[in-house]
Structure formats: C-alpha cells, structure tokens
Image: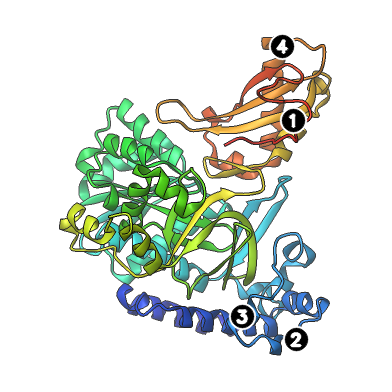
Amino acid sequence: MNEGKPQRALQALQHFLETPLNRLLENVGMADSEASVLALFRDVAARVPAYRQFLDERGIDPASIRSAGDFSTLPLTDKANYLQQHKLDELCRDGRLDSCDIMAVSSGSTGKPTFWPRFLSDELVTAVRFEQAFHDSFAADRRRTLAVVCFALGTWVGGLFTTACCRHLAAKGYPLMVVAPGNNKAEIWRVVRELAPQFDQTVLLGYPPFLKDVIDGGIAEGLDWRPFQLKLVMAGEVFSEEWRDLVGARAGIADPAYGSVALYGTADAGVLGNETPLSIVIRRFLGRNPAAARELFGESRLPTLVQYDPRARYFETRDGTLLFSGDNGVPLLRYHIADTGGLVPYEEMLRFLAARGFDPVAALSQAGAQAGGRGVRPLPFVYVFGRSNFTVSYFGANIYPENITVGLEQEQVAGWVTGKFVLQAIEGLEQAPHLAIAVELAPGIAADDSKRDSIAQSILTQLLRLNSEFQAYTPPEYRLPRVSLKPSGDPDWFPVGVKHRYTRK
C-alpha cells in the first residue's frame, strides 16, 4: 500500500472543490510564479531519481539554484536526453510508479509510444483550465450544461483526461452532465438529439476538423444545432478566425468570443493554457490587422493565442521555441517540447494594442454585454504556431515524416520513388480534410493511377501500423492519403540543389 496517496488525493480535491475560480486565479504575479518553480525544482531534485542523476551527470549542485536567474541556467530536458534515458519509475517521485494512478499514451516519431503516468492531483491542475472555459466563456455555473466529449477514447490522452476534468467540475457544483461518445459521429448525433433538449446549452469537446465534420454531418442528417445553444472546446489544431466564423454560423453560435475555447495541451503535461474571451477578441483584431500580427508574433501566420497561470505552468522561450516547467506524474523542468511560439505579458499586450487604437477590454464588454464582463483576467499570454520538428497535425494526431518514409520503403513501391515527398494536412473551410502527399518519382518512372493508388495504400498501411494516434483520432473515411506523383526534380516540389523539406504548412 502507498499510504500517502489518500492524503494527497483528499488535499488536492478539497482545495479544488472548495476554492472558487476567482480565488484560484487571483494575485498572479511573476514573483509568485518564480517562487513556485523554484519550490518545484527543489522538490524534484530531492525526490526524482532521474532528475538527480541528470543534474549529477552535468555537475550541477541543486543548492546553487537560488533564484529565477539561476534556474534559467539549468540545461533543457527533452524526450531524448531525459525521458528516454530512464525507466518510467525513475521519472516519478521517490522512484515509485505507484505514486500515480492512470497512464496515458502518446506516439513517438516512429510510432513507439511514450507513457505519461499521472495522479488525481495532476488532473485537478488541468481541471482549472476547463473551469475557466466553462465559467468565463460559457457561464456554466448558472446554465444546465451537457458536455459531449468527442475526443478519441482509450489510452490516448484526450478523451479520458477531458472526461475526468469535466466530472471534477460537476463535483464542484457546476450543473454539468458529461457524456463521452468519443469520435463516433452517429453516437454523438444520437446523444445530442436525445439529451440536449433537457439542458440550457450543449458543449462539444474535440479536435477542430472533427467537430466541423460533426456539425456539417449533423446538418446533413437533419440535425438543427441552433436550439441547443452549442458551444465548442477544441485542442490539437491551429485554426483561423474565418474557420471559427464559418463553423460558428453553421452551429448557431452568435458570439465568437463566448462560444468557443481552444486549449493548448500536450500529452506530456495536460493543458498548459486556454483561450479566453479576451484572447479571442485580441486574436480576431490581429487577424484583421496582419501587419500588427506580424509585428507582435514575428510571422505572417496567426498562431493560437491563449492565457496561462504562471504558477501552474512556468513558461520560458529559447530560440523561438517554448520551454515549460510544471508538476505532473512525471514532473518536468525546463522541458523543450519543440513548439514554436513566444510569450507576451498582460500589460505589454494591452500597451501594444492601445498603440494601435484597440482596447480589447472595451471591445469585449461591447461584444458580450450579457456575459457581465466575464473573461478578463490579468494573466500572461502564450502563443504557439505548432511543432518545429516537421510534424503536421491531423485530427489532433501528430503525423511524422518518418511514418510516411516507411510506407515509401515497402518492396512493392520502393522501386518507383526516390523517397522524397512533401506532406500537408489540408483542412480547408469547404473541402473535406485530407492528408496530401506529393511524392517524387524515380527518374524514368511514369505516373499512372495504379502506382498512385498503390503508394497511397502502402503509406496508409504503415501509418496505421506505426502511429497509434493516427489510428485512434482519424475517422476511417479521412485516413487514406491523397497522393500526387511528381516527376524527378520537379521545380515546384523537388527542386535540385535545394535542401528538401518534407512538410509544408
């Protein structure tokens, strides 16, 4: 028996259930966040065998880390130099895997799963992010709410983690009912038809392209979403504000700032940050003003923009990518997740916008007068473009170039191709989502439909074999890639003498 677990669970539950959201998020300052991350560092250095060894091998004395400046000198951790160097129990406190109670799985670049243990207390940290969404955006503390979990169910982190967090909100007193049909569209439509009329509002939680497919497919099935006061909680994809408008119109969502929330989450550490009504108003302004967006974010594309609690997840940046530190079943310190993005303090964001004639707080008050000013909290912002390691995200599954390579290396197709390809996830507003793969033919090989179909099937077979996220998250009708065959040295896709990039956004 692990006699400490009941006390840990009771203390965490009592704190979450008895503390109102406003108190959980009040007085958030940098001094508090720095004190929190230093306390986490001292605890992890003392109790996690893998991290003690990580420091010892690099000649670092934990006692020398006394300030945030000292902390910023610590070496980064990642899957290769930390997680994959140790057994799973060594990554947990006191070297005990039984300090956790549930396991989640994410696929690695070759399909080999990474296991992420967690305990009830870890779920409650993420549950606060869900509480922000349901309280600040959807006023679910005063509206009877049906939460329909449309993430894939199973060992993958999205479905069960989301279900657990929503149940914690119900236990806290929110008039919330949770139902988890997973990514089964027919079952989603059935539960909505039968249950939604008994509630004031219905929230669909899932990956953006899948939720769009659920909404569009429901309309085709004769389902009118408008009476259900639909709301959306999404994760795993960067989407445009035009996408939000289109899907919102089809779902009958009148107020974009209070009708949907995107989460910035990972299997590694749960939800790191969440959209708020304020962040959505800001992002929509920046979407209409691309020059301002480029100045703020350094790129012309629009990233996901969320707010975060720096006491729960301590963010830093390094060379245009994000690092975070946070407590979990496997505590992570200065963890490099390979997401490109950056940080903007709250006051700095307001000053930047004011200099361009925009007051987001006033705009939010005008847009959501009935919401009573909810969704304005002085929390810092983090923006994220997505992974910097050449993956593409498709229905929330990370698709890696290595998975595609294996498909092209199979005996029945290898003689036709050079092995070069360009991978894209196409999720346009009006077209069906699909994986588009341009493949370079070997010199002297002519394209034909039979080769194209054989290559697509070979890639699909290997994706299903190697990538468990792809198999779990992607609906069967959207799995087969759309392959196009290009001649060797095609100047638009495979120019000679240029370093090849295997993905294209």
Q: Earlier in the sequence, mark 1 or mark 4?
A: 1
- Please say if 172 is above or below 493: below
Q: How crowded is mark 1: few (under 14 residues within 10 Å), some or many (20 or more)?
A: many
499 relative position to 384: left or right: right
**Residue to which mark 1 is pinned:** 407
Q: How crowded is mark 3: few (under 14 residues within 10 Å), some or many (20 or more)?
A: few
Label 2 to label 4: alpha-carbon separation? 61 Å
Question: Could you tell me if residue 126 is visible in this image?
Answer: yes
- Label 2, secondary structure: give it: loop
Q: Earlier in the sequence, mark 2 or mark 3?
A: 2
- Label 4, secondary structure: give it: loop
Please tell me whether mark 2 or mark 3 is closer to you in this view: 3
- Label 1, secondary structure: give it: helix
Q: Which label was assigned to residue 14?
A: none
Label 4 to label 3: alpha-carbon separation? 58 Å
- Label 3, secondary structure: give it: helix
**Residue to which mark 2 is pinned:** 61
CB within 8 Å, label 2 to label 1 = no
The amino acid type found where label 4 is placed reads Ala
The amino acid type found where label 3 is placed reads Gly
Label 1 to label 3: alpha-carbon separation? 47 Å
Q: Which label was assigned to residue 447?
A: 4
Q: Which of 380 and 81 is in front in this view?
A: 380
**Residue to which mark 3 is pinned:** 69
Q: Which of 331 and 243 is in front in this view?
A: 243
Q: Residue at x 51, y 57 (%)?
A: 265
- Please say if 401 is above or below 94: above
- Please say if 400 is above or below 260: above
Q: Earlier in the sequence, mark 2 or mark 1?
A: 2
Please tell me whether mark 1 or mark 3 is closer to you in this view: 3
Label 1 to label 4: alpha-carbon separation? 18 Å
